Image: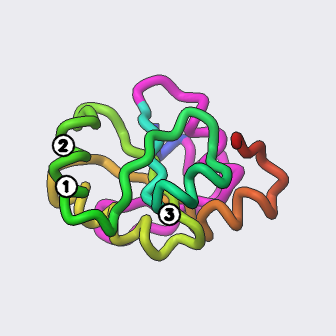
């Protein structure tokens, strides 16, 4: 599926097993079955506006990995984002090391908003 998405939407940047995509590619993947959306920002940031359907697991929380392992299904692709893409890359690395397939929103929710994508408050 990822290869098809990359072929259809253009080149995807990869870092290890993490695929970095832009807002349009990310939105297209959200429509797929078998994905789970994770907002890795703080609860306050999440409450201020997030992508609909996102589960909030703060990557800076000391129990991020334990929460992720408890709440996420490793058989489903994890789509992750933060504010600008830095924390979500950190989270992506943790998730990849735990056996997840991960897609990161390059540029984070800032990129999402710049592309006029919907935000839920």
Relative height, residue 108 to residue 46 (above, below): below
In 3D space, how far apart are the residues under numbered discs 3 and 1 (Cα atoms)? Answer: 21 Å
Q: Nearer the viewer, residue 64 or 11?
A: 64
Q: Residue at x 48, y 51 (%)?
A: 39
- For marks 3 and 1, the one nearer the N-term is 3
**Residue 41 in the image, given as x and y percentages of width and height:** 47, 61
- Magenta highlight range: 5-34
- Residues at badges 2 and 1 in contact (C-beta under 8 Å)? yes
Crowding at mark 3 (Cα within 10 Å: few <14, some 14-19, many 20+):
many
Crowding at mark 2 (Cα within 10 Å: few <14, some 14-19, many 20+):
some
* Image quadrant in which the C terminus is located: top right
Q: Nearer the viewer, residue 65 or 73?
A: 65
- Residue marked by disc 2: 69
Q: Is residue 110 left or right of residue 99?
A: right
Q: Residue at x 59, y 49 (%)?
A: 47
**Residue 65 in the image, given as x and y percentages of width and height:** 19, 55
Q: Secondary structure at mark 2?
A: helix
**Residue 82 in the image, given as x and y percentages of width and height:** 52, 63
In 3D space, how far apart are the residues under numbered discs 3 and 2 (Cα atoms)? Answer: 22 Å
Residue found farthest to the front? 44
**Residue 120 in the image, given as x and y percentages of width and height:** 70, 40
- Residue marked by disc 3: 20
Q: Residue at x 77, y 43 (%)?
A: 118
């Amino acid at each position: 599926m990822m290869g098809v998405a990359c072929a259809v939407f253009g080149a995807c940047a990869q870092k290890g097993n993490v695929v970095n995509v832009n807002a349009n590619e990310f939105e297209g993947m959200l429509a797929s079955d078998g994905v789970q959306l994770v907002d890795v920002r703080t609860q306050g940031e999440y409450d201020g506006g997030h992508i609909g359907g996102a589960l909030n697991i703060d990557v800076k929380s000391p129990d991020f990995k334990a929460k992720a392992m408890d709440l996420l299904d490793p058989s489903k692709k994890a789509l992750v984002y933060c504010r600008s893409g830095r924390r979500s890359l950190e989270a992506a690395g943790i998730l990849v090391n735990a056996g997840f397939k991960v897609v990161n929103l390059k540029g984070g929710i800032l990129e999402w908003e710049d592309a006029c994508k919907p935000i839920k408050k």
